[in-house]
Image (cartoon, grey):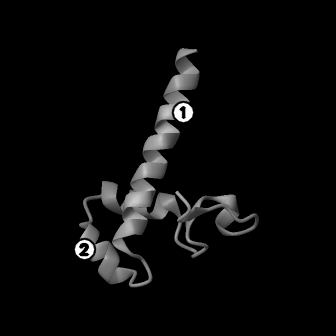
């Protein structure tokens, strides 16, 4: 999870990847629209496969926390 950074003022405070201006939302949006991971990595050469895995882990963790809070 150290690949996901939160920097005030960067991308509106959204979680980004390694301080880059590529947000977790950007990557999730591309993936949910059907864009293959290989194409994302090709279009954004500064990204690494580990970044994609970190995005998915971050999203899964947030979903788990939201769901857990709703049940309590």
State the residue position of label 2: 38
What residue is disc 1 on? Answer: 65
> Upstream in the sequence, badge 1 or badge 2?
2
Residue farthest along the top direction in this orientation? 72
Quadrant housing residue 44: bottom left
Q: Residue at x 46, y 64 (%)?
A: 26
Under circle 2, the secondary element is: helix
Identify whether 31 is placed above or below 42: above
Tell which of 33 and 51 is nearer to you: 51
Measured as percent of width and height from the top left, residue 22 is found at: 52, 71
The number of numbered badges drawn on the structure is 2
Secondary structure at badge 1 equals helix
The reply, left or right, for residue 19 in relation to residue 25 is right
The tag on residue 37 is: none
Q: Where in the figure is residue 7, as x and y percent of width and height?
A: 71, 65
Q: Are marks 1 and 2 in contact (CB under 8 Å)?
A: no
Which residue is at 55% across, 21% downward? 70
Circle 1 packing at 10 Å, graded few (<14), some (14-19), many (20+), is: few
- Taking the view exactly as shown, the residue that stands out farthest to the right is 8
Q: Residues within 10 Å of mark 2 (few under 14, many from 20)?
A: few
The C terminus sits in image quarter: top right
Q: In percent of the image, x 66 and y 61: which residue is there?
A: 6
Rendered view: 27 above or below 65 = below
Which residue is at 24% across, 73% downward? Answer: 38
Give the CA separation, mark 1 to mark 2: 29 Å
In this rendered view, identify the residue nearer to me: 2 or 32: 2
Quarter occupied by residue 35: bottom left
């Amino acid at each position: 999870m150290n690949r996901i950074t939160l920097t005030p003022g960067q991308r509106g405070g959204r979680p980004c990847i390694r301080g880059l201006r590529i947000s977790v939302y950007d990557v999730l949006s591309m993936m949910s629209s059907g864009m293959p991971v290989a194409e994302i990595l090709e279009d954004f050469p500064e990204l690494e496969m580990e970044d994609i895995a970190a995005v998915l882990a971050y999203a899964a963790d947030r979903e788990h926390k939201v769901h857990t809070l709703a049940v309590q």
